[in-house]
Amino acid sequence: MSEVFDLYSPLIDADPFPYYAQLRDHHPCYWSPKAQIWILSRYEDISRAAQDWETYSSSQGNLIDEIPGRAGATLGTTDPPRHDRLRGLSQAAFMRRNLDSTIAPVLEIADRSIDAILQMRRFDFVEHYSSQITVGLLFRTLGLPMRDHNEIRRKVILAVSTDKETKGRTQEHLDAFAYISEFLTEEVTKRRAEPRDDLITHLAEAEIDGDRLSEREIVMTTATFVMAGVESLSSFMSIFALNLHDHADARRRLVADLSLIPSAIEESLRYNTSAQRFKRTLMKDVTLHGQTMKAGDKVILAYGSANRDERKFPNPDVYDINRKPQGHLGFGAGKHFCLGSQMARLVTEIASKRFLEKIPDFHLTSSDLKWNSSSNFRSPVELPFEIG
C-alpha cells in the first residue's frame, strides 16, 4: 500500500490541506506504514480523543518524533493527576504576572521593529517582526539574557524540526534541545541563589499545599514555554500575516476597522494554525471507522485537519473573518488545552494592530515560500515582504 500521508513530505509542509481532505473522506482512521502510527483527521474523532486522556494518553510524549527525556516532565507530556499538579503550579506562577503588563513591552518592540522595517521597505516578516516580538517578550518575561536571543531562536527551530531523509530527529536536533536545557538549567540555578521578579523565579517559588516543582520540572516547563514562544507563537503570527496577504479583502477590512482583528485571529487559528499535529499513545484497544487500533499504538491527532472538516465548519477552505469558529482546535482541547492561549491571542492582537496601522499594504516578493521541516508544526522559514 502506498503512503497516503507522508509526515516527512515537503509537499505536506507547504500545503497539508488537500492531503487532509483525502484522509477525512477516504481514510479517517489511517495507518501510516512508514511512520508506524495512526492518523485521525475528522473533527469529531479528534475532539473526542483530545477529551479522553485515559484512552489517548500523553504520558509517553506528544511530539511525533519525541525528544528523549521530555516525556513525563512537561504539561504536554503528562496525564492526570500528575498533569493537574504541573498545571496548577504553572498557573500559580503565571498568576503572579499581570497579563496586561505584556502590552507595553509588545508595543515597544513592535514600534522599534516597524521603524527599522520602514527604512528597509523590503523585509522578512519572520526575522524582522514576529520573532523580534515573541522572542523579545519571552526573554523579558523569563528574565533571560538578551545576548542569547538569536542563538536560542536558532536552537529552538532545530529542536522542533525533523530530517526528511532519516524520517526523524538527527543528533543535531537532539543537541539543540540539550543546549536549551543546559542554558535553562543554569538560569534556574541562578534564580535559586538570587530570586528575581520573572517567570523562572515564580515557577521555582510556586507552591500549592506545600508541593513545589522539582528542578527538572522547572527546566522542562521553562523549555516548553521557550519552544512555544519562539516557534509556535512566532509562527502563528507569521501565518496570520500570510493569511492577510493572501486575502486582501479581509486585510482591507481590518485596516478600516481594527476592532475586527480578534475575530480574524480566531479564524486564522482555525484556518491555518501552526500547531498541526500532536501524538497520543493508546491505553486500550479502540475500533474506529472499521479499523482496530491496539493498546500501545501511537495515534496522531491532526488538529489542522479537524479545523478544515466540513462536517464541523461550513465552507472550511474559505477564510472568513466573520465566521466566529466556535470549537476550533487551534489551541488543542481537553486537559492539554494551551496554557498560554490568552497571552498568545493578546500578543498577536497588539502586534498585528500596530503593524496594520503603520504598514496597511504589503506583498510577497517571492511565490516560492520555504517551510520549516517538522512532523508537528507548520511554519514559514521566512516571509519576504515589500511595503506597498
Image (spheres, rainbow, N blue to C red):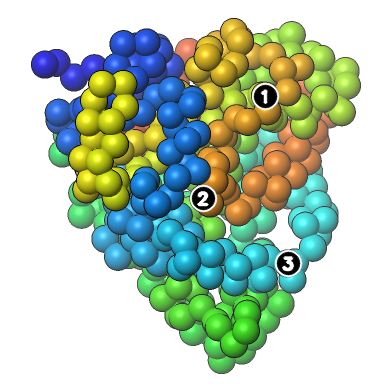
Specify which label sits upstream in the sequence, 2 or 3.
3
The amino acid marked with disc number 2 is: His
Mark sitting on residue 325:
1
Which residue sits at x=54%, y=46%?
334
Measured in 3D between alpha carbons, the distance from the residue under mark 2 to the one under mark 3, in whole angstroms, is 18 Å
Percent of width and height locating residue 249:
74, 8
Which residue sits at x=35%, y=58%?
59
Percent of width and height locating residue 47:
50, 34
Mark 2 in CB contact with mark 3 (< 8 angstroms)? no
In this rendering, the label closer to the viewer, 2 or 3 = 2
Q: Quadrant of the N terminus?
A: top left
Specify few, some or many for label 1: CA neighbours under 10 Å numbering under 14, 14-19, or 20 or more: many
Check disc 1 and report its element: helix, strand or loop.
loop
- Observer able to see residue 21: yes
**Left or right of 387 in this view: 337:** left
- Which residue is denoted by mark 3 in the rendering? 95
Measured in 3D between alpha carbons, the distance from the residue under mark 1 to the one under mark 3, in whole angstroms, is 28 Å
In this rendering, the count of numbered labels is: 3
Measured in 3D between alpha carbons, the distance from the residue under mark 2 to the one under mark 1, in whole angstroms, is 20 Å
Check disc 2 and report its element: helix, strand or loop.
helix
- Observer able to see residue 128: no
- Which residue is denoted by mark 2 in the rendering? 336
Q: In the rendered view, would you say 40 is above or below 73?
A: above
Mark sitting on residue 232:
none
Percent of width and height locating residue 90:
59, 67
Q: Residue furthest bottom?
A: 193
Find residue 180 and report its image quarter: bottom left
In this rendering, the label closer to the viewer, 1 or 3 = 1
**Left or right of 251 in this view: 368:** left
Specify which label sits upstream in the sequence, 1 or 3.
3
Which residue sits at x=77%, y=57%?
99
